[in-house]
Image (spheres, rainbow, N blue to C red):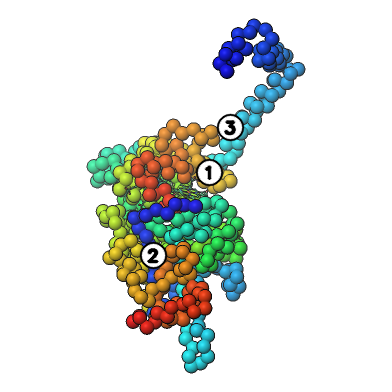
Amino acid sequence: MEQQMRSSGNSPKGGWLSTLIDLVLSYYARIISQPFQSGLVWFLGGLGGALFVGWILFPMALYSEQTQPINFSHAIHTMPDIGLDEPTELGRCLHCHSFRNDGTFAGIPKLETCMECHDDPESPLGETAEEKKFLKQYVANEKEVPWFSYYKQPDCVYFPHIAHVKMGKIDCRTCHGDHAKTDNLPLYKKNRLTKYSINIWGKHISGYKANTWDRMKMDDCAECHTKTGHEENNACFVCHK
Amino acid sequence: MMKEEKGKYKYGMVIDLDKCSGCGTCMVACASENNVSVRADESDKERSITWMQLFKITNGKPFPDTEVSYFPRPCMHCHHHTPCVSVCPATATRIDYNTGIVSQIYTRCIGCRYCQAACPYHARYFNWWDGYGLAKPFSKGLERALSPEVSVRMRGVVEKCSFCHHRLMSAKSKAYAEGRREIREDEYIPACAEACPTQAITFGDLNNPRHKVSQLIKSPRAFRLLERLGTEPKVYYLSSKSWVRKMADNYLPNQFQQVTKAMT
């Protein structure tokens, strides 16, 4: 076997393999030397166009964009001297994003929480126009701010924060990235077909994921459960309802 | 087919037919807890949905020997060779041996209804129409009565009793908030058991010998539906009436053993 291969590889002329290679090479040489007549340009152009449409235009068209009603700054509100009586950063998060006594998560705070500090619509705490807008439109009328939730999962998903934050001791950042460091809220992008926020399936249509918080699909949940040795939580009726 | 494993918990139910008065509270409690959809005409029982079905059975004897028994039937959550799980081509229904609960994921279900055909207990129901909140304009406004703890179903999917597993998850969250890992026996009770006015339904962990269900299933009155199929249902019944027990399974002539005498 080995003998045979070496002999055919060594023979300078006439081997069927080298004839084949010659044929293929001359074929490609012709394609490359005459890109227009051979159709190479059209093929590559079409491929590039298809990739552009599929990977760039389609994702752009797929997601609708909305701005949040108020540009809420987490950077300001999580500062140690903001006036919340909490020594730790997590404590400050949990002041607004609190757990109820039955272990459920209150999510985005209601106006009541904001009014602990922004209690008087006539006297703003800072100088910004955004705060004046907030006071005038919402605090003065005692109207709830209709926030868009970036991380809202589909209706069929059950996600308990208390199991992760209190029992699992997982940092908010692991799943929410630097949202709590931002000064300006990003655009809220909603998938026009599924109505899910872009944060669920991720920004990269290729499926590329650099950070733990880039997306939160079923597999991302299960991946962490497996890694942290909580495989018992990978049954359907744990995350679904 | 999933391999049967020994899990940590094995939730089960015991229904005392001697106590059941057939009032139907369990059905109502179940339907409102689990967002079971209603239709404009609910009288068509071939098409309506009831996770907890209540049957009335009689011994067929003329007056004055007539006897009646009522028979609530949730999903049996079969522990062995779960018939629906073994036929589902979409893994929309699975059994979690860690809790013993048979799950149904509506978004995964493709509506082929094999599971309905496979289920020996007719515990599975098909959505011929969109449910609450989805079907407009009939259900307009009804969505305000929905519970956020159970997702609504669309047309074309199968649904069934879940042992109110969302109550298990809520009970766990509450335990975590109070700094406990384990939940207490009375913290996880399905809506039907909670609502039953005669307390005919008992619920708990069959793996835990201290739970009431584990003691009740040792009673000589205990039996299961179609036990001889070998599906190991986790719903047990208690009855002192021999004819009721006989009706619960298929027997050859003279095969049924009268057990009434031995029981008290």
Which structural element holds mark 1?
Answer: strand
Instruction: Name which of mark 1 and mark 3 comes first in the sequence.
Output: 3
What mark, if any, has residue A180 been given in the picture? Answer: none
User: At numbered mark 2, what does the secondary structure look like: helix, strand or loop?
Assistant: strand
Q: CA distance from mark 3 to mark 2?
A: 52 Å
Q: Which mark is residue A56?
A: 3
Residue located beneath label 1 in the image: A190
Residue B51 vs residue B33, the one in the foreground: B51
Give the mark toward the camera: 1 or 3: 3
Within 10 Å of disc 2 (Cα), the crowding (few <14, some 14-19, many 20+) is many
Q: Is residue B162 above or below residue A192?
A: below
- Circles 3 and 2, Cβ within 8 Å, touching? The answer is no
Callout 3: few (<14), some (14-19), or many (20+) C-alpha neighbours within 10 Å?
Answer: few
Mark 1 is surrounded, within 10 Å at the Cα level, by few (under 14), some (14 to 19) or many (20 or more) other residues, namely many
Going by the numbered disc 1, the residue's amino acid type is Lys
Task: Give the numbered dot on residue B12.
Answer: 2
Image location (x, y in percent) of residue A70? 44, 44
Image mark 2: chain: B
Q: Position of residue B260 (x, y in %)?
A: 39, 82
Image quarter of residue B33 = bottom left
- Secondary structure type for disc 3: helix
Residue at figure coordinates x 46%, y 34% from the top left: A209
Residue B36 shown left or right of residue B40 in the figure? left
Q: Residue furthest bottom?
A: B64
